[in-house]
Amino acid sequence: MHMSPDEFRALAAQATDFVADYWERVESFRVLSGVKPGEIGAVLPESAPERGFIEEAEPAAAWGRVFEDLERIVLPGLTHWQHPGFFAFFPANVSAPAVIGELLSAGLGVQGMLWATSPACTELEVRVLEWLAEMVGLPRTFTSRDGEAGGGVIQGTASEGTLAALCAARYRAKRAWRAEGAGHVAGHGAGHGAGHGAEAEPHLVMYTSEQAHSSVVKAAMIAGLADGPQDRRHVRLIGVDAAGAMDPAALEQAIDEDVAAGRCPFFVVGTVGTTGTTAIDPVGAIAAGVRRACSGRGDLAPWIHIDAAHAGAALICPEHRWWIDGVEGVDSFSFNPHKWLLTNFDCSCFWTRDRASLIGSMSITPEYLRNAASESGAVVDYRDWHVPLGRRFRSLKLWLVIRHYGVEGLRRYIREHIRIAGLFESWVRADGRFEVTQPRTMNLICFRLRGPEGASGAEVDALNKRLLDAINASGRVYLIH
Ligand code: PLP
C-alpha cells in the first residue's frame, strides 16, 4: 500500500518542481490573499476520503489531482510570505538549502528526544549551536565547551524559549528561597527572604518592558503567574525611553520596591529588536541594574533572558555586536533563524549559561526513557530542555544553510537588507508628506503621513489607515501598522 521508492522519487521530484516554479512566479501573485472567510473550506470535502489513491488503478497518476488542487485551491488562499512585496511583520525567509534540510529531516524521520534515540541528531545540534553562538558573539559560557555550564538548543519558537527561561528562573528562585528559609529556621538567615520558613511560597515577580513581545506575558499566563494579559500581581511592565528601549533605572526601582515589600523578583526579559519598532533594550545596563538591586539580598539572583527573536540574526555582523554588550551577565538568550537567517520555520535558537536550572525545571524520567547513556551523564538529552518530548532533526536545515552560504555570505545578506532599508528611509525622509516616527536601528522603518496642517491626531491616524488599506488592497505590497 505504500509508495515504492521509485514512485516516491518521481512524485517528490514533481513536488520539488512545484516549489521551484512557485519561487520563480511568486511575484505574479497578489501578495495578500483576496479570499473571504470560509471560501477555501467551502470547496474542500466535508469528510476524509474513505478510499485513497492506493485503491485506484494508477495511484501515482491520481496524484496529479493534488497538484491541480494546490494550484486551484491552495495558492489563491495564501498570503505570499516569500513575495518580494511582503513587508509585513518580521520576515520568515526560506531558502533552498533549508528546504532541502527539511526534506532530509522528514525523510530520515528520527526522534531526537534522547541522545540514545539518535546520537547524530543531538550531537549535530550541539555543534551547530556552538557555531552559531560564536557567529553572533555569545561568550563560550553559553556553550558546554571546555566544561562550561551552558549550552544551546533549538526550540520551536521564541515564545517557547521565553517560557523555558521562565521555568528555569522559577526553579532557581524557589530553590534559593527554600535554602535561605531553611537557613533562617536554623538561625543563619539573612537577606531578602529572612523571616520566611522553608515551606513558605515566595511571591514571584517578573519584569519586562511595555514594548516586549506579547509572548512574555503569555508565558506568565501559561505558567500560572497571570490570570490574563492585564493581571499585574506577578508581572511588571517597565517603561521605555523615547526610542522604545527599556529604562534600566525604572527596572532597578521596581525590583527595589518589590524586595522591600518582601516579594521575590525572579525573572527579567529584555528585548533586542522590539516587535513594534526594533528598539534595543540596554542589555548591560539591565544586567548591572538587576545585580545592584539584588546585592546583599541573600541568594536573590533574578534570571535575565534576552529575546532577540528578529534582531539576533544581524549580530553575525560585528558592527552590530554592541547591541548585546554586557550579555555575559545574562542567563539566557534567544533568536530565530526562522525569521531573518534564511532557515524555514520552525527554528528558534536558545542558549543558557545555567543549563542545570533549565534541566532541573524540566527533567522527569519515566522508566521507559531510562538508558545507560543518559545515566552515564556524558550526553545531552534535549527532551529536558523544553516542553515537548519528541523532537525533529531541526539542526539539519541550519547546518545546510550555514554551510551553503558561509558566515561571510550570511553577513552579506543581512548587510544588503540593512542597506536597502536605509535607502528606503532616505526616500521617506526626502518626501515632505511623510515622517519617520522612530529611529531606524536595522531593517524596519516606522513612517507615516504627516497629514494636513492643523489635523488632529485621530484625523492623521485615519488618513494613515486609509493609505495602509489602499496599499494592501493593491496586491503588490503588504505592510502592517
Ligand atoms: N519576540 C519578539 C521580539 C518577536 O518580534 C516575536 C515575533 O515577531 C516573538 C518573540 C515571537 O516569535 P515566535 O513566533 O518565534 O514565538
Image: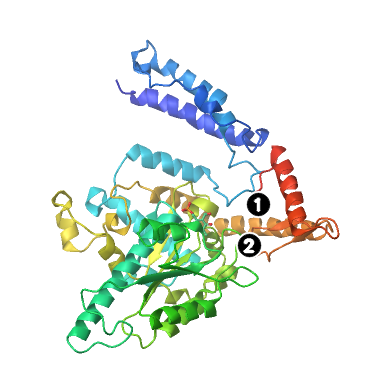
Side (left or right) of 296 relative to 459:
left
| Picture disc at residue 56 | none
Residue at image point 58% right, 42% down: 81
376 or 310, nearer to the observer? 310
Cα–Cα gap, marks 1 and 2: 18 Å
Residue 269 in view here: no
The picture quadrant where one finds residue 57 is top left
391 or 468, nearer to the observer? 468
What colour scheme was applied to this rendering of the protein? Answer: rainbow
Task: Name the residue carrying label 2.
Answer: 442
Task: Name the residue carrying label 1.
Answer: 481
10 or 327, nearer to the observer? 327
Sequence-first tag of 1 and 2: 2
The local crowd at label 2, few if under 14, some if 14 to 19, many if 20 or more residues have their Cα within 10 Å, is: many
218 or 100, nearer to the observer? 218
Residue 229 screen position, x and y as percent: 47, 58
Q: Is mark 1 within 8 Å of ligand 1?
A: no
Residue at image point 27% right, 58% down: 384
Residue 340 screen position, x and y as percent: 55, 54
The picture quadrant where one finds residue 73 is top right
Residue 209 in view here: yes
Q: Amino acid at mark 1?
A: His
The picture quadrant where one finds residue 333 is bottom left
Side (left or right) of 467 relative to 138:
right
Residue at image point 78% right, 58% down: 456
Q: Amino acid at mark 2?
A: Met
Q: Are marks 1 and 2 in contact (CB under 8 Å)?
A: no
Where disc 1 sits, the SS reads: loop
Residue 46 screen position, x and y as percent: 43, 21
- Number of numbered markers: 2
The residue at the far top in this view is: 57
The local crowd at label 1, few if under 14, some if 14 to 19, many if 20 or more residues have their Cα within 10 Å, is: few
